[in-house]
């Protein structure tokens, strides 16, 4: 499904992904992207990268056939 292996290093990203997935369902990835874009537009690079990591975690958690072991 994915052309490359996604890598997420911090627990905060998975916690954020879980929250968005519970609240937004299938639109969770779009919401994470929108939040990243808003943060970028405001010049807040810390929150921009946070929401990008959350988006990658959503992709990992939503993949029905993970390419590697998820811990």
Image: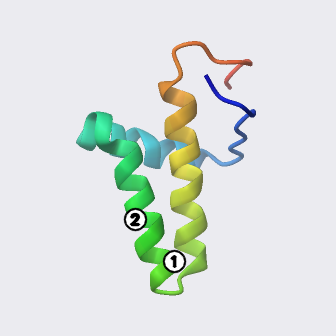
Residue 67 numbered mark, or none: none
Q: Residue furthest top?
A: 65
Helix, strand or loop at mark 2: helix
Residue found at x 53% / y 35%? 59
Q: Where is residue 31 drawn, in percent x and y?
A: 34, 53
Q: Mark 1 points at which residue?
A: 40
Vertical position of residue 70 compared to residue 48: above or below:
above
Residue 15 seen in the current view: yes
Q: Where is residue 4 drawn, in percent x and y?
A: 75, 34
Query: Are there few (<14), some (14-19), or many (20+) residues within 10 Å of tag 2?
Result: some
Residue 19 seen in the current view: no
In primary-sequence order, the first of circles 1 and 2 is 2
Towards the viewer: 33 or 54: 33
State how far apart marks 1 and 2 are (Cα): 9 Å
Query: Are there few (<14), some (14-19), or many (20+) residues within 10 Å of tag 1?
Result: some
Q: Quadrant of residue 29?
A: top left
Q: In which quarter of the image is residue 18?
A: top left
Q: Mark 2 points at which residue?
A: 35
Q: Where is residue 20 drawn, in percent x and y?
A: 35, 45
Vertical position of residue 63 compared to residue 3: above or below:
above
Q: How many marks on residues?
A: 2
């Amino acid at each position: 499904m994915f052309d490359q292996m996604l890598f997420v290093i911090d627990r905060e990203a998975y916690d954020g992904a879980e929250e968005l997935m519970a609240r937004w369902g299938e639109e969770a990835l779009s919401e994470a992207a929108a939040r990243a874009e808003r943060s970028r537009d405001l010049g807040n690079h810390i929150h921009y990268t946070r929401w990008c990591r959350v988006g990658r975690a959503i992709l990992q958690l939503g993949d029905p056939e993970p390419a590697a072991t998820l811990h």
